[in-house]
Amino acid sequence: MFKINCLNPISNVGTDLFTENYEIVENYADSDAILVRSAAMHDLELPDTVEAIARAGAGVNNIPLDECAKKGIVVFNTPGANANGVKELVIAGLLYAARDIVGGINWVQTVKDDENVAKLVEKNKSKFAGTEILGKKLGVIGLGAIGVKVANAAEKLGMEVLGYDPYISVNAAWNLSTNVKHIQSIDDIFTQCDYITIHVPLLDSTKYTINKETIAKMKDGVVVLNFARDLLVNDDDMKEALESGKVKRYVTDFPNPKSVNMPNVIATPHLGASTAESEDNCAIMAVKQLMDYIENGNITNSVNYPACSLGVCQKAGRVAINHKNIPNMIGQITSVISACGLNISDMVNKSKGDYAYSLIDVEAPATDELYNKLKEIDGVIKVRIIK
Ligand SMILES: NC(=O)c1ccc[n+]([C@@H]2O[C@H](COP(=O)([O-])OP(=O)(O)OC[C@H]3O[C@@H](n4cnc5c(N)ncnc54)[C@H](O)[C@@H]3O)[C@@H](O)[C@H]2O)c1
């Protein structure tokens, strides 16, 4: 029986996937694996029984990743599970920015008690008029899970879409509509686009991608959308650009003391992933990844251990080894296996930074003797007999 603790409420559509071999326990100290959303884990004393932590969501700064890796605890997240939720809000942002819809809605509230409201509307509506997005050029910076969906949806709405991502994954490239122009220079987006939306992670290399210099290259009256991270845009430079009219509107999902006070800002309260479907998708993905790790030893979407899979275990035995990424580990591991009289039928070894993972199928059930001998190897962190 595997004991699972949920540090935060996790959608039932995820936890319902657990079979009769799993039990939900109240206390993380009694668990073999943990499901978490945003609960702070840095100060938790995790017991040695914990084998994995699955974060139902993308950000993992609430989890001590390196401490976990050192203990052989694999940490998973659920990239892309909320991509459609974010995409839909970005499309709303494009439409909101094309006319002064927010200004118009707010103005209607100011005349709601006037019995001549219908006449006032007809007289004043031109103040809130704008343009259509059909035929306009959209630049998408970052073609990952969200960027690809935004690019494809905007193209379907009749926009001309340029996409930029020098590190695009094969999967993302397959999913990108052939009508989206995948460009090699980000400057093409800055100089040509009427709307620019950014969907990259916040890294040292992406911080302030939208700044004084890049804004200067943009078309007058451009609309900038930021549903990725606050610090991708330099607020002081954006404020100046909004005040001068260089940027017509700035649509952001990250209100802060500076951005909420800028003119022509449309700010949503970090709503990108706040849909029931996104939460369900994250829970389903987190639970499936956890079960595959517990039952088969496979690792998908870990942030502190490498991706590694031998599929569903169909051999007589399988052993999983979390170890340091240092020379001669494979040699020692395979020697121990053969010294125990076991024949290896399949194996895979992957590394990520300082840590590595070996998954080995053997032609007879793995034994306690094998477990004990593998544990003695210097550099081995954790051994699991899966079968
Ligand atoms: N608003 C929200 O609620 C919300 C929800 C989920 C994610 N996000 C944010 O959206 C971002 C994107 O999410 P995702 O799921 O698409 O991530 P992802 O990892 O699938 O995609 C990110 C893409 O950015 C690309 N990239 C990295 N550096 C780049 C650079 N310098 N120039 C161009 N492209 C670059 C990567 O190659 C990758 O394809 C996340 O990092 C997160 O910060 C926001």
Image (spheres, helix red, strand yellow):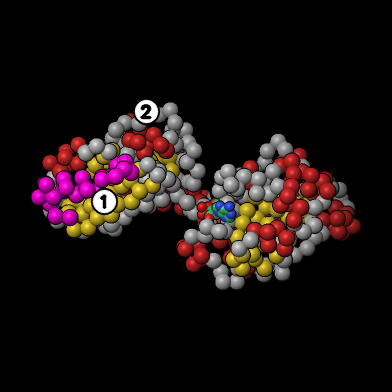
- Magenta span: 319-344
Q: Is residue 369 left or right of residue 275?
A: left
332 falls in the magenta region? yes
Whether tag 2 and tag 1 are in contact, CB under 8 A, the answer is no
Q: Residue visible at 65% across and 49% down?
A: 209
Going by the numbered disc 2, the residue's amino acid type is Glu
Mark 2 or mark 1: which is in front?
1
Query: Is the residue 336 above or below the residue 91 in the image?
Result: above
Disc sitting over residue 359 in the figure: 1
Residue 367 location (% of width, % of height) = 13, 45
Where, by quadrant of the figure, is residue 258 drawn? top right
Outermost residue, left direction?
341
Q: Does the segment drawn in magenta span residue 105? A: no
Instruction: Report helix, strand or loop for mark 1.
Output: strand
Circle count: 2
Q: Report the disc number at residue 45.
A: 2
Residue located at (21% from left, 54% from top): 361
Tell me if 262 is positioned left or right of 150 in this view: right
**x, y percentage for residue 88?**
60, 57
User: Can you say whether 84 is above or below 286 in the image?
Assistant: below
The Cα–Cα distance between marks 2 and 1, rounded to whole angstroms, is 28 Å
